[in-house]
Image (tube, grey):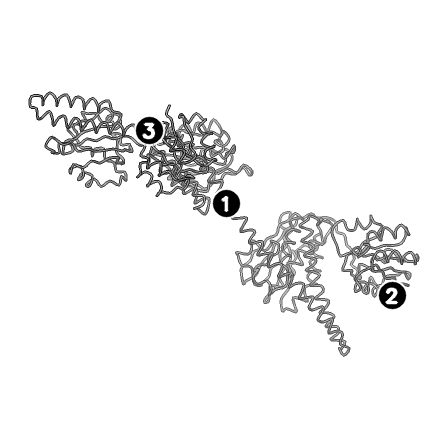
Amino acid sequence: MKHLLLIEDDKVDQMAFERFAKTDEFNYTYKLAHSISVAKAILKNEKFDAIVTDYFLGDGNAFEILELKIDIPIIVTTGTGSEEIAVQALKMGAYDYLIKDIDGFYLKMLPITVKNALQRFQSEKELKEYHTNLEVLIEQKKAELEKEIKINKETSEDLLKMNMIFKNSNEVTFMTDNKGIITYINPKFTELYGYTADEVVGKVTPRILKSNAPNNIDYDNFWHKLTNKQSISNFSYINKKKDNTLVHIEGSFEPILDTSKNLIGFLAIQRDISERIKSQNIQKVLYNISNAVHTTKTLKQLIKLIKQELKVIIDTTNFYIALYDDVNNQITLPFFANEKEPFTDISAKNSIIQYIIKNKKTLFISGQELVKLGKENNFTVSGAIPKQMLAVPIKVGNNITGVIVLQSYTSSEAFTEDDKNLLIFVSYQIGLSIQNKKIEEDLTFALEKATESDKLKTAFLHNISHEIRTPMNGILGFANLLKNPQLTDEKQQSFIDIITKSGERMLNTLNDLMDISKLETGQIKINLTTTNINDELEILYSFYKREATNKGLLLNLILPKGKDEIIIKTDRDKLYAVLSNLIKNALKFTTIGGIDFGYTIKDKNLEFYVMDTGIGIPKNRQHAIFDRFVQADIEDTNVFEGAGLGLSISKSYITMLGGKIWVESIEKQGSQFYFTLPLKETEANYIEAINDTELKTGINTKKINVLIVEDEEIASIYLSILLEDYSSKIFLAKNGEEAIDIFKKNPEIDLVLMDIKMPKMGGYEASLRIRELNKNVIIIAQTAFTFPGDKEKALRYGCTDYISKPIQATNLFSLIKKYFEK
């Protein structure tokens, strides 16, 4: 068994080599040296058949070993992939080089590389012996020619010896005359090229072996050197066999001179280095495929490059890679090359790809066998039937992630068993590269989404700041103006209207934020009630008609003919909110023309629409307007009021109600928003509306004693004003502790309006303590928090009922009427 010296200073590479050396693929003994100095010391005392050395070592590099001029093959390994290092190493006498890859494929190539180097070393050694013998024979011939008596006998013996040497050589050997006509071939020539001596000797020149492959040989210069009696050694090129297949050759050429130094012929010695070239090509392909993850931008580009690289070692004319998504059971074709017919997708069911993935085995088969296999296993062969197919599963770990497919439509012998094994070998690196590229694409996509999200949130924060500051400025500004005692009644009323409008605008913004928060946490619930669609639309029309008229716009309500009323089961408040939001948006973004809104009946759905003649939405923004924090143009949102939340909320509501929402728009011409709701017809329920004035004047109660528990002074004053006509006494407390003390001292209190969030003691605890003192007092919780469960929590802590802030007079009077009406 051959004995190797491995020089390697990297611990990880040492461990990887030692693990590999224990496998059946490694048939050598070895000794390990971790530095140049240790290696030199070992070489003084031990003999080795070959040396494998890393280039970069702790105390030097591989060139110091090459400089020792040791008469054994030396193979250099490097992790840099530098061509300069490789070229310099070969110039200094290295037999070969290997590029380390991160996956350790170079270790699998190492036994083949060592084997080739040892064979080459032996062949060169024999060649040197041949040259030496040839020179001796020539010298002998020269000496014998000086002795006329022995010249014929000696020459005959020399030729016989030479013939025996060449005949038993493992190298291809042939001779020509000085015109290049072949005069002798050995058995190895016939074995390699397929020509017999009768076919070539005395008949043709070695140019019969010339191929059309790109040899980079200047034949004129080549012939010029030989005819000028110059030797040519270690020359690599590609020749053609008798059957037209190609073979990689490394050879040497020597001029043959007679005793007078005249050129009488040429001697050629060649060896087949196809396996070595193939090994180098495979290693280069693996390296390039691994590196392509970083040099290509998309998965399609990567697979296209993989095809180009594989072309060096196998026919990829008809090539594709099918990738399998086991989560969604889908097959995709990022890249496809087919000379017969292109197609872009393959069914995940009943297909050849599904069959290969399921069986996890390579398929190497003829077209006829493929058709038969399809019938037997119930899968369809799409497209033209190839004459031969080679399909290899792509494995990453224990998972099958896809299939590499090669096909030939011209030959049933286009691919060999060696091609199959080769494709299986490289498929592991292909799988890793594709997986890494997909991970890279996923990360790039996530980064783009994160960048977009940051941009949207920044714009959103600017909008929110604007939507809060602007109405706040109106409230504070006009409130200060109201302090002027010389204001006319008309101006006072105008300023009050502005303050009210600003407050409503800020409240809308806060309500939108609250709704988004609830949607985020899944706290929005559906409350299905019987809803008269026509009535709801009439209310919306009446509400927005004045605003449209003030802007000079037409507002049209269009109802289906023949339908006086449509009553369905839905969440009335959410339907109203969606339609209100769409109409408000239409009014906001329309300056000329008008707005049409209504609905049609389609199958088992109501299809609502709001159409305007406004600014429209750019096509590249239409997909995003239903996202949170987005308006159609986030760069220009300050032009229009709104936080960019309304459409997102609307979409969530419609989805919860079992419908869908979409937009059709042409920029500068207008937009049409549509949404659907399931049509579930039911009996009509009519509820008579009561306005604030009717309710307030309709209350018939006794004078009550009220305790207002509120830490905000303005809110406390507001409630006191609302209740002053219906109260005998009003008590004020700023926190729960004060409320309990006041209640203990005034047990005649009939109603407690309890704020929930207060300093010292909150409303929940205070309600519980007051309830312990009096089982019958009415306690109404008031809070700015409107999450589901707030009302139930208040009831658990002893409250009688619940009202949310901002408190509307209508709602408060309804509760007073409910509990105190005579």
Q: Residue furthest bottom?
A: 486
SS state under label 3 = helix
In the rendered structure, are the residues bearing label 3 and label 2 in contact, judged by CB atoms less than 8 Å apart?
Answer: no
Decide if residue 438 is on the left or right side of residue 129. Answer: right
Decide if residue 363 is on the left or right side of residue 140. Answer: right
Q: Which residue is mark 3?
A: 118
**Is residue 654 or residue 260 the one in the foreground?**
260
x, y percent for residue 560: 65, 55
x, y percent for residue 586: 62, 61
Q: Which residue is mark 1?
A: 440
Give the alpha-carbon distance from disc 1 to disc 2, as whole Å: 71 Å
x, y percent for residue 95: 33, 34
Disc 2 packing (10 Å; few <14; some 14–19; many ≥20) = few
Residue type highlighted by circle 3: Leu
Residue type highlighted by circle 2: Asp
**Quadrant assignment, res 337:** top left
Residue 438 to residue 819: above or below: above
Q: Considering only order in the chain, which callout, 1 or 3, is on the residue closer to the N terminus?
A: 3
Disc 1 packing (10 Å; few <14; some 14–19; many ≥20) = some
Q: Considering only order in the chain, which callout, 2 or 3, is on the residue closer to the N terminus?
A: 3
Give the alpha-carbon distance from disc 3 to disc 1, as whole Å: 42 Å
**Is residue 165 or residue 383 the one in the foreground?**
165
- The disc label shown at residue 155, or none: none
In the rendered structure, are the residues bearing label 3 and label 1 in contact, judged by CB atoms less than 8 Å apart?
Answer: no
1 vs 2, front mark: 1
Q: Considering only order in the chain, which callout, 2 or 1, is on the residue closer to the N terminus?
A: 1
x, y percent for residue 774: 91, 52
Residue type highlighted by circle 1: Glu
Give the alpha-carbon distance from disc 3 to disc 2, as whole Å: 112 Å
Residue 800 to residue 277: above or below: below
SS state under label 2 = loop
